[in-house]
Amino acid sequence: MNEIEKNLLKEVAELDSIPVGAYNIRSNGAPLMRNSTENIDIVPKTDKPGIDIFIKAGTKGESVHIPVIISQSGLKDLVYNDFHIGEDCDITIIAGCGIHSCGDQETAHDGIHTFYLGKRAKLRYVEKHYAEGEGRGKRVMNPTTVVHLEEGAHMEMETTQIAGIDDTIRKTEGTLNENATLIVKEKIMTTGNQFASTDFDVDLNGEGSSTDVVSRSVARDSSRQEFTSRINGNAPCAGHSECDAIIMDDACVLASPQLTANDVDAALIHEAAIGKIAGDQLIKLMTLGLTEEQAEQQIVSGFLR
């Protein structure tokens, strides 16, 4: 890898070297390096680009790194990754994509990730998107995450997009069986003329299933954001959706939380708040010696932490 690719890898997966354990690193639309372990088998697909990850039942304390890096301007990459996680596992998966584009053509990555969690399995899934470069071509990422949780399974998903992505459509779908839990924590910042669309759609099908979807975003300059969440309570269950956004300059934010209760014991809540940075917060920090710009940065950083 060259220095650009190494920097992308550090940004999206916090890797300074080849990770320990199972990993699959994809570079410029092709596999770069891969490693399986005794409990985690990574198998390339034969019918389309992507991999299947098979994790043995009972695997605990192990991790899988599957970052994607693109340094070739004009490349449009599409990948399908399926995760088969056995019963009673407790693991971490680190994903993410980084783009470096210096050309005038659009550079894009579409990742379709599908998760199958067995009974009582636990997963922490971390996904970070980042782009850079001086080129005028758009940098586009469209991640799709599909989650199937069996009885008692638990998945926590952390997604971050802070810099460089010009256009993104982010879709997350989930089906939860009895006593399954899905927690989603999203952080987004858009600047310039960037556009970001987030779409969550969760079906709570099993008794005792629950979801908590929280999105925090900052829209600056003339950027636009759209947030849509749909929680469908089809059994005695609990669902919560929250969208908190800071709007600045000439930006636009649209929040559309939707709840559907198809069971008398479905307890569903949604919250949405959009507003500017409070003047008293700025004044307080400026009295400590910060400029207005520095104070704004401090507030935004704390909000997205």
Image (cartoon, rainbow, N blue to C red):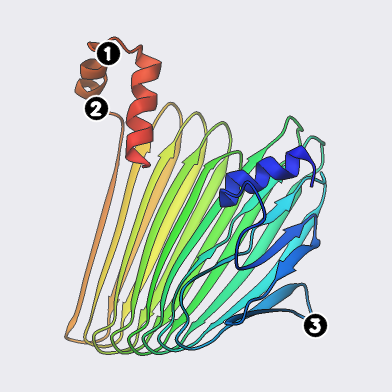
Question: Which residue position is annotated with label 1?
Answer: 286
The quarter holding residue 156 reads bottom left
- Position of 135 with respect to 57 (left or right) is right
* Mark 3 to mark 1 CA distance (whole Å): 58 Å
**Residue in the foreground of this view, choosing between 279 and 32:** 32
Q: Position of residue 92 (x, y in %)?
A: 48, 67
Q: Where is residue 36 in the image (x, y as percent from the top left)?
A: 67, 75
Quarter of the rendering occupied by the C terminus: top left
**Which label lies toward us, 2 or 3?**
3
Rendered position, 260 above or below 11:
below
Give the residue displayed 48% in from the left and 57% down from the top: 198
- Position of 165 with respect to 91 (left or right) is right
Give the residue displayed 79% in from the left and 35% down from the top: 102
Question: Which residue position is annotated with label 3?
Answer: 47
Question: Which residue position is annotated with label 2?
Answer: 278
Which comes sooner in the sequence, label 2 or label 1?
Answer: 2
Q: Position of residue 80 (x, y in %)?
A: 68, 72
Rendered position, 110 above or below 286:
below
* Mark 2 to mark 3 CA distance (whole Å): 53 Å
- Position of 26 with respect to 179 (left or right) is right
**Would you call the spot at circle 1 few (<14 residues within 10 Å), some (14-19), or many (20 or more)?**
some
**Residue in the foreground of this view, choosing between 53 and 197:** 53
Give the residue displayed 81% in from the left and 52% down from the top: 75
Which comes sooner in the sequence, label 2 or label 3?
Answer: 3
**Would you call the spot at circle 2 few (<14 residues within 10 Å), some (14-19), or many (20 or more)?**
few
Look at label 1 and name its amino acid: Met
Q: Position of residue 161 (x, y in %)?
A: 52, 47
Which comes sooner in the sequence, label 3 or label 1?
Answer: 3
Look at label 2 and name its amino acid: Ala
The quarter holding residue 44 reads bottom right
| Marks 2 and 1 close (CB-CB < 8 Å) | no
Look at label 3 and name its amino acid: Asp
